[in-house]
Image (cartoon, rainbow, N blue to C red):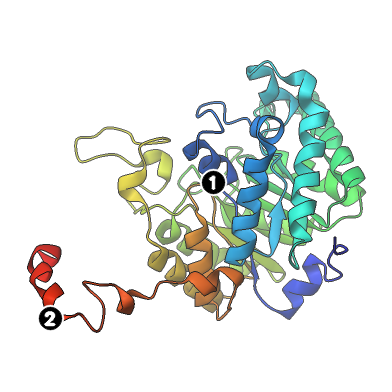
Amino acid sequence: MPDRSTRGILERLKAGVVLGAEGYVFELERRGYIKAGPYVPEVVLDFPNAVRELHREYLRAGAEVMVALTYYAHREKLKDVGREGDLEAMNRQAVRIANEVAREGDALVAGDICNTWAYDPKNKETSSKVVRGMYEEQLSWAVDEGIDFVIAETNDYLGEALIALQTIKELRLPAMVTLATTRPHQTWDGYDYVDACKILADNGADVVGLNCDRGPTTMLPIIERVRSRVSGYVAAQPVPYRTDPEMPTFESLKTAGGANVFPIALEPFACTRFEMAAWAERARALGVNYIGICCGSGPHHVRAMAEALGRTVPASRYAPAIELHPVIGAQVEEKEKEFLADWKG
Protein backbone atom coordinates (compact mmCIF):
# COMPACT_ATOMS: atom_id res chain seq x y z
CA MET A 1 0.00 0.00 0.00
CA PRO A 2 1.30 3.53 -0.80
CA ASP A 3 2.86 5.59 1.97
CA ARG A 4 1.09 8.51 3.61
CA SER A 5 0.83 11.66 1.54
CA THR A 6 3.89 13.89 1.76
CA ARG A 7 1.81 17.07 1.28
CA GLY A 8 0.37 18.18 4.60
CA ILE A 9 -2.75 20.23 5.18
CA LEU A 10 -0.90 23.54 5.51
CA GLU A 11 1.10 22.92 2.35
CA ARG A 12 -2.11 22.13 0.46
CA LEU A 13 -3.91 25.20 1.79
CA LYS A 14 -0.98 27.37 0.78
CA ALA A 15 -1.24 25.99 -2.76
CA GLY A 16 -5.00 26.45 -3.11
CA VAL A 17 -8.45 25.33 -1.99
CA VAL A 18 -8.73 22.04 -0.10
CA LEU A 19 -11.98 20.13 -0.64
CA GLY A 20 -13.35 18.38 2.40
CA ALA A 21 -16.34 16.11 2.92
CA GLU A 22 -18.08 15.21 6.13
CA GLY A 23 -21.54 14.05 7.11
CA TYR A 24 -20.55 10.42 7.60
CA VAL A 25 -22.93 9.96 10.51
CA PHE A 26 -26.04 11.15 8.65
CA GLU A 27 -25.19 9.20 5.49
CA LEU A 28 -24.53 5.98 7.40
CA GLU A 29 -27.80 6.46 9.30
CA ARG A 30 -29.61 6.68 5.96
CA ARG A 31 -27.92 3.44 4.91
CA GLY A 32 -29.07 1.68 8.08
CA TYR A 33 -25.81 1.50 10.03
CA ILE A 34 -26.21 4.22 12.68
CA LYS A 35 -29.09 4.87 15.07
CA ALA A 36 -30.64 8.32 14.72
CA GLY A 37 -30.87 10.06 18.07
CA PRO A 38 -27.66 9.05 19.84
CA TYR A 39 -25.74 9.09 16.51
CA VAL A 40 -22.88 7.11 18.02
CA PRO A 41 -20.65 5.56 15.29
CA GLU A 42 -21.01 1.95 16.45
CA VAL A 43 -20.73 1.09 12.75
CA VAL A 44 -16.95 1.46 13.03
CA LEU A 45 -16.80 -1.81 14.96
CA ASP A 46 -20.02 -3.48 13.83
CA PHE A 47 -19.79 -2.90 10.06
CA PRO A 48 -16.31 -1.55 9.26
CA ASN A 49 -16.73 -2.25 5.54
CA ALA A 50 -19.61 0.23 5.41
CA VAL A 51 -17.31 2.93 6.78
CA ARG A 52 -14.52 1.89 4.44
CA GLU A 53 -16.83 2.09 1.42
CA LEU A 54 -18.16 5.55 2.31
CA HIS A 55 -14.61 6.86 2.73
CA ARG A 56 -13.80 5.38 -0.66
CA GLU A 57 -16.83 7.01 -2.29
CA TYR A 58 -15.86 10.43 -0.94
CA LEU A 59 -12.27 9.88 -2.05
CA ARG A 60 -13.37 9.01 -5.58
CA ALA A 61 -15.64 12.06 -5.58
CA GLY A 62 -12.71 14.36 -4.88
CA ALA A 63 -12.44 14.73 -1.10
CA GLU A 64 -8.84 15.41 -0.09
CA VAL A 65 -9.29 14.51 3.57
CA MET A 66 -10.54 11.28 5.09
CA VAL A 67 -11.98 12.30 8.44
CA ALA A 68 -11.75 9.44 10.93
CA LEU A 69 -15.26 8.55 12.09
CA THR A 70 -14.71 9.41 15.73
CA TYR A 71 -17.44 12.04 15.88
CA TYR A 72 -19.39 11.25 19.08
CA ALA A 73 -17.00 8.36 19.72
CA HIS A 74 -16.23 9.86 23.10
CA ARG A 75 -16.86 8.62 26.61
CA GLU A 76 -19.94 10.77 27.24
CA LYS A 77 -21.87 9.53 24.19
CA LEU A 78 -20.77 5.90 24.37
CA LYS A 79 -22.37 5.73 27.83
CA ASP A 80 -25.72 6.45 26.16
CA VAL A 81 -25.58 3.22 24.16
CA GLY A 82 -23.80 1.06 26.71
CA ARG A 83 -20.55 0.82 24.78
CA GLU A 84 -18.11 2.78 26.92
CA GLY A 85 -15.97 -0.37 27.05
CA ASP A 86 -15.45 -0.09 23.27
CA LEU A 87 -14.07 3.44 23.46
CA GLU A 88 -10.45 2.73 22.58
CA ALA A 89 -11.21 0.04 20.01
CA MET A 90 -13.71 2.29 18.22
CA ASN A 91 -11.34 5.23 18.04
CA ARG A 92 -8.37 3.17 16.88
CA GLN A 93 -10.39 1.29 14.26
CA ALA A 94 -11.82 4.51 12.82
CA VAL A 95 -8.35 5.97 12.22
CA ARG A 96 -7.05 2.72 10.76
CA ILE A 97 -9.90 2.61 8.23
CA ALA A 98 -9.39 6.26 7.28
CA ASN A 99 -5.68 5.62 6.77
CA GLU A 100 -6.30 2.56 4.65
CA VAL A 101 -8.57 4.42 2.23
CA ALA A 102 -6.53 7.65 2.22
CA ARG A 103 -3.57 5.69 0.86
CA GLU A 104 -5.66 4.57 -2.10
CA GLY A 105 -5.39 8.18 -3.28
CA ASP A 106 -3.46 11.29 -2.32
CA ALA A 107 -5.59 12.09 0.72
CA LEU A 108 -4.85 13.20 4.26
CA VAL A 109 -6.23 11.70 7.45
CA ALA A 110 -7.83 13.97 10.03
CA GLY A 111 -8.40 13.00 13.60
CA ASP A 112 -11.80 14.25 14.74
CA ILE A 113 -13.10 15.57 18.04
CA CYS A 114 -16.35 17.40 18.62
CA ASN A 115 -18.66 18.95 21.17
CA THR A 116 -18.87 16.68 24.21
CA TRP A 117 -22.11 17.84 25.89
CA ALA A 118 -20.02 17.82 29.09
CA TYR A 119 -18.79 21.43 28.99
CA ASP A 120 -20.58 23.79 31.39
CA PRO A 121 -19.53 27.47 31.49
CA LYS A 122 -21.23 27.78 34.90
CA ASN A 123 -18.96 25.06 36.24
CA LYS A 124 -15.99 25.81 34.03
CA GLU A 125 -13.13 24.46 36.14
CA THR A 126 -14.60 21.01 36.74
CA SER A 127 -16.22 20.55 33.33
CA SER A 128 -13.10 21.73 31.50
CA LYS A 129 -11.08 18.95 33.13
CA VAL A 130 -13.65 16.40 32.03
CA VAL A 131 -13.69 17.71 28.47
CA ARG A 132 -9.91 17.87 28.24
CA GLY A 133 -9.63 14.30 29.48
CA MET A 134 -12.05 13.10 26.79
CA TYR A 135 -10.11 14.91 24.07
CA GLU A 136 -6.75 13.69 25.33
CA GLU A 137 -7.74 10.03 25.28
CA GLN A 138 -9.32 10.22 21.83
CA LEU A 139 -6.37 12.05 20.32
CA SER A 140 -3.76 9.87 22.01
CA TRP A 141 -5.17 6.86 20.16
CA ALA A 142 -5.51 8.83 16.92
CA VAL A 143 -1.89 9.98 17.03
CA ASP A 144 -0.76 6.47 17.82
CA GLU A 145 -2.58 5.15 14.73
CA GLY A 146 -1.36 8.02 12.53
CA ILE A 147 -3.09 11.27 11.57
CA ASP A 148 -2.01 14.35 9.62
CA PHE A 149 -4.01 16.99 11.48
CA VAL A 150 -7.03 17.35 13.76
CA ILE A 151 -10.48 18.77 13.13
CA ALA A 152 -12.30 20.00 16.25
CA GLU A 153 -15.82 20.66 15.06
CA THR A 154 -19.42 21.54 15.84
CA ASN A 155 -18.35 23.61 18.82
CA ASP A 156 -21.27 25.36 20.49
CA TYR A 157 -19.05 27.00 23.12
CA LEU A 158 -15.91 29.00 22.41
CA GLY A 159 -14.63 27.82 25.78
CA GLU A 160 -14.84 24.18 24.73
CA ALA A 161 -13.28 24.97 21.35
CA LEU A 162 -10.31 26.56 23.10
CA ILE A 163 -9.82 23.42 25.19
CA ALA A 164 -9.79 21.37 22.00
CA LEU A 165 -7.32 23.76 20.40
CA GLN A 166 -4.94 23.67 23.35
CA THR A 167 -5.04 19.86 23.40
CA ILE A 168 -4.27 19.67 19.67
CA LYS A 169 -1.43 22.18 19.79
CA GLU A 170 0.24 20.30 22.64
CA LEU A 171 0.45 17.37 20.23
CA ARG A 172 2.22 19.66 17.70
CA LEU A 173 -0.38 18.96 15.03
CA PRO A 174 -2.13 21.43 12.71
CA ALA A 175 -5.53 22.37 14.11
CA MET A 176 -8.74 23.15 12.28
CA VAL A 177 -11.40 24.42 14.69
CA THR A 178 -14.93 25.14 13.53
CA LEU A 179 -18.00 26.43 15.30
CA ALA A 180 -21.63 25.35 15.20
CA THR A 181 -24.10 28.19 14.59
CA THR A 182 -27.41 27.09 16.06
CA ARG A 183 -28.04 30.49 17.65
CA PRO A 184 -28.66 33.61 15.55
CA HIS A 185 -25.44 35.51 16.26
CA GLN A 186 -23.47 34.07 19.18
CA THR A 187 -21.94 30.92 20.61
CA TRP A 188 -23.69 29.43 23.59
CA ASP A 189 -21.25 31.22 25.87
CA GLY A 190 -22.04 34.59 24.33
CA TYR A 191 -19.33 35.31 21.74
CA ASP A 192 -20.17 36.70 18.33
CA TYR A 193 -19.30 33.97 15.82
CA VAL A 194 -16.85 36.20 13.96
CA ASP A 195 -15.16 37.31 17.18
CA ALA A 196 -14.93 33.68 18.31
CA CYS A 197 -13.20 32.66 15.07
CA LYS A 198 -10.76 35.55 15.47
CA ILE A 199 -10.00 34.50 19.05
CA LEU A 200 -9.34 30.93 17.94
CA ALA A 201 -7.02 32.12 15.18
CA ASP A 202 -5.21 34.43 17.60
CA ASN A 203 -4.71 31.47 19.94
CA GLY A 204 -2.97 29.41 17.29
CA ALA A 205 -5.67 27.61 15.29
CA ASP A 206 -4.31 27.03 11.79
CA VAL A 207 -7.79 26.98 10.23
CA VAL A 208 -10.98 28.45 11.70
CA GLY A 209 -14.54 28.70 10.51
CA LEU A 210 -17.98 27.12 10.62
CA ASN A 211 -19.46 23.68 10.07
CA CYS A 212 -22.88 22.07 10.21
CA ASP A 213 -26.26 23.59 11.25
CA ARG A 214 -26.62 26.13 8.44
CA GLY A 215 -27.13 25.55 4.77
CA PRO A 216 -25.17 27.48 2.13
CA THR A 217 -27.54 30.45 2.01
CA THR A 218 -27.45 31.23 5.73
CA MET A 219 -23.83 30.25 6.37
CA LEU A 220 -22.48 32.48 3.62
CA PRO A 221 -23.09 35.90 5.29
CA ILE A 222 -21.33 34.81 8.49
CA ILE A 223 -18.40 33.20 6.70
CA GLU A 224 -17.96 36.33 4.60
CA ARG A 225 -17.53 38.34 7.82
CA VAL A 226 -15.14 35.72 9.20
CA ARG A 227 -13.06 35.94 6.03
CA SER A 228 -12.83 39.73 6.39
CA ARG A 229 -11.61 39.49 10.01
CA VAL A 230 -9.30 36.48 9.95
CA SER A 231 -5.98 36.72 8.12
CA GLY A 232 -5.28 32.98 8.17
CA TYR A 233 -7.04 30.01 6.62
CA VAL A 234 -10.85 29.84 6.78
CA ALA A 235 -13.06 26.74 6.56
CA ALA A 236 -16.76 26.47 5.72
CA GLN A 237 -18.75 23.23 5.68
CA PRO A 238 -22.52 23.84 5.49
CA VAL A 239 -25.23 21.22 5.55
CA PRO A 240 -26.81 20.61 2.12
CA TYR A 241 -30.25 21.87 3.07
CA ARG A 242 -32.21 24.94 1.95
CA THR A 243 -32.14 27.04 5.08
CA ASP A 244 -33.32 30.65 4.87
CA PRO A 245 -33.50 33.75 7.10
CA GLU A 246 -36.78 32.56 8.66
CA MET A 247 -35.41 29.03 9.24
CA PRO A 248 -31.64 29.61 9.38
CA THR A 249 -30.57 26.17 10.60
CA PHE A 250 -31.60 22.67 9.65
CA GLU A 251 -32.78 22.17 13.22
CA SER A 252 -35.32 24.96 12.65
CA LEU A 253 -36.72 23.72 9.32
CA LYS A 254 -40.48 23.09 9.34
CA THR A 255 -43.10 21.87 6.93
CA ALA A 256 -45.83 24.18 5.64
CA GLY A 257 -47.97 22.77 8.45
CA GLY A 258 -45.43 23.73 11.09
CA ALA A 259 -43.99 20.28 11.86
CA ASN A 260 -40.29 20.04 12.62
CA VAL A 261 -38.38 17.87 10.14
CA PHE A 262 -35.02 17.58 11.92
CA PRO A 263 -33.32 15.16 11.96
CA ILE A 264 -34.94 12.36 9.91
CA ALA A 265 -37.50 14.05 7.63
CA LEU A 266 -35.20 16.61 6.00
CA GLU A 267 -35.43 15.29 2.44
CA PRO A 268 -37.89 17.94 1.12
CA PHE A 269 -35.30 20.61 1.95
CA ALA A 270 -32.29 18.84 0.41
CA CYS A 271 -29.98 20.81 -1.88
CA THR A 272 -29.26 19.43 -5.32
CA ARG A 273 -25.75 18.73 -6.54
CA PHE A 274 -26.01 21.90 -8.64
CA GLU A 275 -26.75 24.04 -5.59
CA MET A 276 -23.75 22.63 -3.76
CA ALA A 277 -21.56 23.19 -6.83
CA ALA A 278 -22.70 26.82 -6.84
CA TRP A 279 -21.88 27.01 -3.13
CA ALA A 280 -18.33 25.81 -3.78
CA GLU A 281 -17.87 28.48 -6.44
CA ARG A 282 -19.22 31.24 -4.17
CA ALA A 283 -17.07 30.12 -1.26
CA ARG A 284 -13.94 30.12 -3.41
CA ALA A 285 -14.78 33.61 -4.69
CA LEU A 286 -15.01 34.80 -1.07
CA GLY A 287 -11.55 33.42 -0.35
CA VAL A 288 -12.58 30.40 1.72
CA ASN A 289 -9.63 28.00 1.86
CA TYR A 290 -11.19 24.75 3.09
CA ILE A 291 -14.48 24.19 1.29
CA GLY A 292 -16.62 21.27 2.35
CA ILE A 293 -20.00 19.89 3.23
CA CYS A 294 -21.48 18.42 6.40
CA CYS A 295 -24.51 16.39 7.60
CA GLY A 296 -26.73 15.30 4.72
CA SER A 297 -23.93 15.12 2.18
CA GLY A 298 -23.60 12.47 -0.46
CA PRO A 299 -20.76 11.64 -2.86
CA HIS A 300 -22.76 13.21 -5.72
CA HIS A 301 -22.59 16.56 -3.92
CA VAL A 302 -18.84 16.23 -3.42
CA ARG A 303 -18.17 15.31 -7.04
CA ALA A 304 -20.22 18.29 -8.24
CA MET A 305 -18.29 20.58 -5.89
CA ALA A 306 -14.96 19.20 -7.07
CA GLU A 307 -15.89 19.71 -10.71
CA ALA A 308 -17.15 23.23 -9.96
CA LEU A 309 -13.67 23.93 -8.59
CA GLY A 310 -12.22 22.83 -11.93
CA ARG A 311 -11.13 19.34 -10.95
CA THR A 312 -11.47 16.02 -12.70
CA VAL A 313 -11.77 13.26 -10.12
CA PRO A 314 -12.06 9.46 -10.44
CA ALA A 315 -15.86 9.61 -10.19
CA SER A 316 -15.95 12.14 -13.04
CA ARG A 317 -15.77 9.16 -15.37
CA TYR A 318 -19.41 8.55 -14.48
CA ALA A 319 -20.59 12.16 -14.48
CA PRO A 320 -24.04 12.58 -16.08
CA ALA A 321 -24.36 12.43 -19.86
CA ILE A 322 -28.03 13.38 -20.18
CA GLU A 323 -27.62 13.90 -23.92
CA LEU A 324 -27.46 10.10 -24.20
CA HIS A 325 -30.75 9.50 -22.40
CA PRO A 326 -33.15 7.53 -24.63
CA VAL A 327 -36.06 9.96 -24.19
CA ILE A 328 -34.75 13.35 -23.12
CA GLY A 329 -31.37 13.10 -24.81
CA ALA A 330 -30.00 15.24 -27.62
CA GLN A 331 -30.83 12.81 -30.43
CA VAL A 332 -34.14 11.20 -29.59
CA GLU A 333 -35.35 8.70 -32.15
CA GLU A 334 -38.68 9.51 -33.77
CA LYS A 335 -40.34 6.49 -32.18
CA GLU A 336 -39.47 7.75 -28.66
CA LYS A 337 -40.82 11.27 -29.14
CA GLU A 338 -44.33 10.13 -28.22
CA PHE A 339 -43.07 9.71 -24.64
CA LEU A 340 -42.02 13.36 -24.30
CA ALA A 341 -45.49 14.73 -23.59
CA ASP A 342 -45.82 12.44 -20.58
CA TRP A 343 -42.24 12.94 -19.39
CA LYS A 344 -42.36 16.73 -19.55
CA GLY A 345 -45.90 17.13 -18.25
Horizontal side of 10 relative to 297 (left or right) equals right
* Residues under numbered marks 1 and 2 in contact, where contact means CB atoms less than 8 Å apart: no
Q: Position of residue 298 (x, y in %)?
A: 50, 54
- Residue hosting label 2: 334
Q: Give the position of the C terminus as an image quadrant.
A: bottom left
Task: Give left or right: position of 145 versus 43.
Answer: right
Which residue is drawn at the image coordinates 42% and 57% (left, top)? Answer: 218
Q: Nearer the viewer, residue 44 or 235?
A: 44
Asked if residue 58 is positioned above or below residue 305 in the image, the reply reads above
User: Whole-percent x and y of residue 313?
Assistant: 60, 73
Q: Earlier along the polypeptide chain: callout 1 or callout 2?
A: 1
Residue 302 vs residue 258, the one in the foreground: 302
Residue located at (13% from left, 67% from top): 344
Q: Quadrant of residue 8?
A: bottom right
Q: Is residue 150 visible?
A: no
Q: Quadrant of the N terminus?
A: bottom right
Question: Which residue is drawn at the image coordinates 52% and 41% (left, top)?
Answer: 26
Q: Residues within 10 Å of mark 2 (few under 14, many from 20)?
A: few
Q: Amino acid at mark 2?
A: Glu
Residue 217 in sight from this viewpoint: yes
- Image mark count: 2
- Indicate which disc residue 186 carries: 1
Position of 29 with respect to 140 (left or right) is left
Q: Quadrant of residue 96?
A: top right
Badge 1: few (under 14), some or many (20 or more) residues near its Cα, within 10 Å? some
Task: Please indicate whether residue 333 sits to the left or right of residue 178 in the image.
Answer: left
Name the amino acid type tagged 1: Gln
Nearest to the eye among marks 1 and 2: give it.
2
What percent of the width, then of the height, locates residue 36? Answer: 50, 29
